Every structure is written in structure tokens, then in C-alpha cells.
Image (cartoon, grey):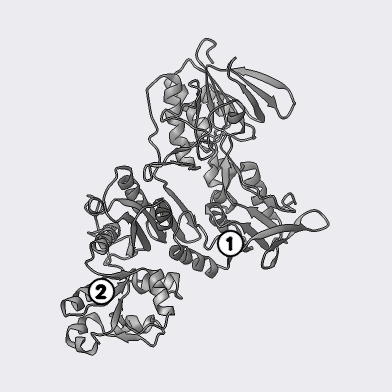
Amino acid sequence: MSDTGKRIVVIGGVACGPKAAARARRCDPTAQITMIEQGEYVSFAGCGMPYYIAGAVPEKEGLMTTTTGYVRDPEYFQTMKDIKVLTGTRADSIDRDNKLVHATNLKTGDTIEIPYDKLVIATGAKPIVPPLDGITLKGIYTLRSLEEAIEIRKTIEENAELENAVIVGGGRISLEVTDAFANQAVDATIVELLDSILATMLDPELALYLENTLKKHGMNILTQEKVLRFEGDENGKVSKVITDKREIETQMVVVAVGVRPNVDLAKAAGLEIGVTGAVKVNQHMQTSDPDIYAGGDCVETDNLVTGKKCFMPLGSVANRQGRVIGDNITGYSDDTFPGVVGTSMLKALDLNVGKVGLTYAEATKMGFDAETFIAPSADKSHFFPGGKTMIVKLVAEKETQRVLGVQVIGPGDMPRVVDTVAAALTTGMTLQQLANMDVGYAPPYASAISGLAHCANALRNKINGLAKSLTLTEFKSKVDSDQDFILLDVRKENEVKNMKLDDKRFQTIAMHELPNRIDELDKNKEIVSICQVGGRSYETVLMLQGKGFNNVSYVEGGMSAWSKTFGEGGDEESH
């Protein structure tokens, strides 16, 4: 390490910090770079911890290796990067006047002073720990460190008496750890205070699809339920979770109700905190002190969809911000981080779940006059074998038809859809532009008109008033009511026999028979048309309108989407 180069100190060694340090070394070979990390491990994939617990990542080193197989430990950083790494070391305070970081070696208790010319704060986020009685009992985890992930996996694998586990909170971490319990035949219960699980990623009807799937795999899902306290046994180990509705026996609890930015160090140093409660930075990732930069889960950023500040604690965001910081602290370039569109995805058992931008609930809460459409689709052409299905829900602003977000769930190729919409949101595309984006096509990979383009076109039709449609939630309300209407199923006989709605208003006329049997329908009654995925029922509405029927609509997503959300499941059809 050079004794004369710029002194760069990085506080935090998980995602943003190591990325900033490594990029700084590439940009400035003479810099003196020191990274401080309170834990034992550095530069590990925190987002991969649930998959390590589940055994999908066999060894913990898999979370710390480079693509070429090197383990990113302190020796690696020293040998390969000429970066000094101090693990087991806590940064206690920042002396901005004298440009010093005061730190403590947690093993020896020794205190040290580390001078800097440029400082990077990458202290991440810390779990929200509810102040409940019994929260400190043994066997209760929050999963915010690799050390804790190692302990959880060891407990699952070695404890033959582990039969029941409780996950408090129904967010992304909760869903990702379900695999761990399922793989080890542990009965798991998710307790969620809100009306549905994964509420920040999915609107309620798609959350129901996820919930139904989890239940089929043996999970117990309890929504609209509040945890009151924990009780332990004579050894001080958790044994019960007490909610406002029941008692749940358990041998392990994972508390995952969210995280908040870890800003204690920055706040104590007098740095400006933003409206979200995270450190305020500009697009260069500079704090209110021009010689101090910050990134990752401790900072706020710009939401490119809403134009407002947001807190987005994701490893992907942290790594991108780390590169920007590395460029700027060395003076290599005047790089900027423009913001985020809120892209997130996860795997829950056999379902792929993704979201980018705003859900309909978020859009309406933020004041957008939004409209949505739901469309099932396959990730291959319908005639090509092996296609897997997804449900796509697109959200757009009515007046401008600007795309606001998408949600995708199913075993199909979710990332392609989500990443395409991420590009559309970044550039401010409309539905028309999204539908006509020149994406790739070949039967093994997609349809000639992709499922996403189909959904965008259907939403355009809906906003423009070409045909009235009912969302799954609206259809559920209508089915549950005593309204007098005709529920017209236009599928073929074998499809209806396989899966149908048990409703006295149900009437079936296959679409190919409808032109010759249209007189069987009462023009004075409301008609709601349904098919397998929505295409034929949409065509039916247009046909009936052309024959003088004025009160007709169709069900978005058809029986395919209905069966996964409010129904009991069934076969698929793809267009």
C-alpha cells in the first residue's frame, strides 16, 4: 500500500463498501484504502443468505466467492486488491474536523484512529425489532448477518426436534426462507399484520395466488394477525408465539418485519438525514460533507417513477452505488447515480415473483389516476412444448398512459418481463411504446407478440374504452352478490368440464358456436363473459356489442387467473 497516495477509509464491508473500495483501487493504484467491518465476514451476498439456509448454496463460502473461485476474505483483499481490511472492528465516531475515524477492535478492546482524505459510509440497514416481551429468547432470529444465517442453518440441520417454526412478517425475507423449512420438513407459519403477504410487491389478488401456493406446500399463512409476545421454556428458549387470536407452539422464530437505515454514525457526525430517515446524498453519492460519501442500505435515493425520495435496501442498488462512489472519491470520473425504479424479485418455493415500479395500491395512494390489467401468459409460444405460465399485472396512468409498474408471479420466466418494464420505467415509456418495443422472438423463448405486449395492448383497450373488463376482485364481488346477470362461459366443452364456476347464473356457449346461438342470450340482462385466459371473452364482448348488446364485460385473466387467486386451481391455456 502506498504511503503517499490518497487516504480512503470505507466503513462497512458487505455490499456497497467492498464495491466502492475495489472500484477505487482500480481507478487509483496509489491510494491507501482501509475497510472497516464490525462483523467477521466481508463482501458476502447478503441477499443469498436465505438460499444458503435452504441448502441451495451448499457452503457459506459460496456467498463470498468471486466468479473465478476466490474467497473474498481479508487476505484476498490485501493480496489481490491491496486493501487493508479490519474485521471485528467497530467504527465508533467520525471526527470531521480532523478527518479521523475512531474505532474499536472488538476482540482486544483496543481503540484506534484512522485518518482519511475521503470517507465512505456503507453501514447498511438494521432489522426492525419490535419491543415485544420475550424478543430476546434463544431461538429468535432476525437474519441480518452471515453469522446468524450460519446459526439458523445449523439449528435446522442438527436439531431433530425442530418441528415447528414461525416467521413474523410476510415480506420478501420471510418468503425466501420458506424453502429452508420446506426442505427440512419443518412446519412453518407466517404471521402477517397486514391483509396480505408480500404487500409491498403484490396487489392483494396476486398475493392470494402466492398464499394459496404456499398453503398447498404445507405452509400456514395467518394474515391480519398481530404478534403480542413470545414465551420460552425453562431453558430460556422460545416455545410459543402469542398473537391476538391464538397461541402457536414453536422451536424457532424468524422476525422479519422490515429494516431501517443504520444512520447512527452519520447522524452523530452531523451529516444531513433525508426525508426517509436515511442519509441524504446527491447524485454523486456525496453527503452534506463533500469529503464523505455514503451508499447502500443507509442512504435514500430518487424514485424515477414518482419523482420522490425513497429508501431501497437492495444489494443490486448498493453495488451500483458503490461503483459510482469509487469513481468519484478517486477523481477518476464525475459519475452519478440517477435513482431507481424499484425493481425486486424473489423465488418462493416453485413460484417466481417480481415487481418493478408501483403496484396499483401504491399508485393510488400516491395520487396517480391509475388503471390496471391482468393477463396470464406463457414464456414460450403456445405451440412449443415446455412453456411455463405467469400472471402479469400492468399498471399505467390513465390520462398519459405512462407505464407505472408491473407485477409478475408464476413458474415462468418472470425476470425477462420485470427487466423489460424496468427499462420502460427508466425511460418513461407509455403503453404504446412498451407494446411496440422491439424485443426478441423465437418460439422456444417467446410468442410473436409477447405476453407483456399483449397485457399492454389490453390495458390500452381498457383505458380507451374498447371493451369493458372486470378485475378479479371486481368479479369476486359480483359473484358473491345476488345480482341478476348472465355468467357466460365461452370455452370449449372439455375446458368447462375440467374447471367451472358453481353459480346459478352460469351459462355456457362455446365461442365458435356463439354466432349461431346468440338468440339464446337475453339482451336486457347484464352479461359477464369468461374464458380461460381472457382472449376469447374479450372477442365475445366485441361481438355482442356489434349485435346490439349494451351491458357486456369480460373477466381479466379468465379462469386461469381466477383459479389461482380465488378458486381451487386448474389446467392452463396459453395464447
Q: Residue 428: x and y, percent?
A: 29, 45
**Amino acid type for the residue under numbered disc 2:** Arg
Residue sitting at x 37%, y 71%: 560
Q: Residue 49: x and y, percent?
A: 57, 47
C-alpha separation, residue under disc 2 versus residue under disc 1: 39 Å
Residue sitting at x 64%, y 32%: 38
- Which residue is label 1 attached to? 182
Residue sitting at x 23%, y 62%: 464
Q: 138 and 201: which one is in front? A: 201
- Which residue is label 2 attached to? 536
- Residue 372 visible, this orientation: yes
**Which numbered disc, 2 or 1, marks the residue closer to the eye?**
2
Left or right of 73? Residue 311 is left
**Amino acid type for the residue under numbered disc 1:** Ala
Which residue is the extreme one toward the bottom?
520
Q: Residue 123: x and y, percent?
A: 57, 33
Left or right of 325? Residue 269 is right
Number of on-image labels:
2
Please rate how many residues cluster around mark 2, counting C-alpha atoms within 10 Å: few if below 14, some from 14 to 19, many from 20.
Answer: many
In this view, 238 is above or below 249:
above
| Viewport quadrant of the C terminus | bottom left
Asked if marks 2 and 1 touch (Cβ < 8 Å), the reply is no
Q: Residue 8: x and y, percent?
A: 53, 20
| Viewport quadrant of the N terminus | top right
Task: State the image quarter where residue 448 is shown.
Answer: bottom left
